[in-house]
Image (cartoon, coloured by chain):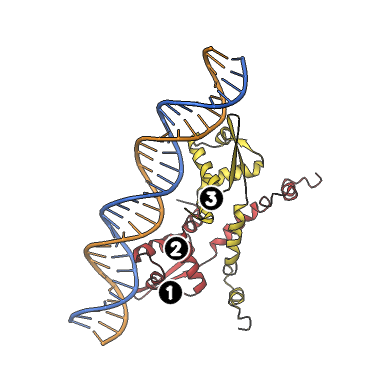
Chain colours: A red, B yellow, C orange, D blue
Amino acid sequence: MEDSFTKTLKALADPSRRKIFHTLIVLASAIPITQVVSEFEISRQGVTKHLKVLEDAGLVHIKTQGRQRYCKADAKPLQEMNKWLQFYDKFWDDSLNSLTDYLGNKDV
Amino acid sequence: MEDSFTKTLKALADPSRRKIFHTLIVLASAIPITQVVSEFEISRQGVTKHLKVLEDAGLVHIKTQGRQRYCKADAKPLQEMNKWLQFYDKFWDDSLNSLTDYLGNKDV
DNA sequence: TATATACGCAACCGTTTAGTTGCGTATCGA
DNA sequence: TCGATACGCAACTAAACGGTTGCGTATATA
């Protein structure tokens, strides 16, 4: 299928999903889908779809309890993103120092 | 239109574009589109489209010189990504300490 | 001047995406 | 047991996406 990192990026590339993820992670506790829906202007099915994408990326975990499905955010997949970024931080300040550090020519 | 952060994430959510970006940034110099194309198995127009998305996200800068268009990667938009991530690193180790740090209840 | 090179633009195609509506069903409370 | 609640599943739609092909054109070179 698709690698997990691509899944994570795709999941977070949508503003609605970022909002849902943010809401859930700040809430820090599991809440039923209906309650998630009440925070947004999208339909229940719309939110459910977004939650599925987030769940597929491991950014949200859902467990059923009775007739309710509790959602909880999980930031772990972001670690991979952070790791990915760490490679590029050598480049983003545009300074020759960091670049030559990467290239290993510290004497230049 | 679309906010810059969403553009950045969408641009990088595609594996081909990540590869192009990576190739360009490691190369550290501006190269013509044709040369970029030669590194991949996608058609020239495919690569051009990807470059346009990357350029629109500020991850690549292109300048014309004669009949050639030189592309150069720019990691600056990644800083915004890094900043975004920094908010969430409080959550990804799952420890109560970091969470309570965020909540400001250091005495709990 | 003729030819090759390096591109842009536009059309097209199949797939995915973001979102909706409709309907069915399991669970809970009165 | 009956109605409300909390959902899933499926179908649908309009738009975007990743990629292609065809054609036109400016620039460089022989």
Tell me the SS state at disc 2: helix
**Residue in the picture at 55% in, 35% down:** B37
Query: Can you identify the residue that label 1 sits on?
Result: A31
- Work out whether residue C16 or residue C10 is closer to the camera in this orientation and state it: C10
Residue D9 higher or lower than B73, as above or below = below
x, y percentage for residue A40?
Answer: 40, 68
* Residue C20 lies in quadrant: bottom left
Question: Dot 2, crowdedness within 10 Å: few (<14), some or many (≥20)?
Answer: some
Judging from the image, what secondary structure is the residue with disc 1 in?
A: strand
Residue C24 is situated, as x and y percent measured from the top left of the image, at: 22, 66
Residue type at the position of mark 1: Ile
Residue under label 2, please give it.
Answer: A55
Residue underneath mark 3: B12
Count of labels in the image: 3
The chain containing the residue under callout 2 comes to: A
Q: Are marks 1 and 3 in contact (CB under 8 Å)?
A: no
Which amino acid type is marked by label 3?
Leu
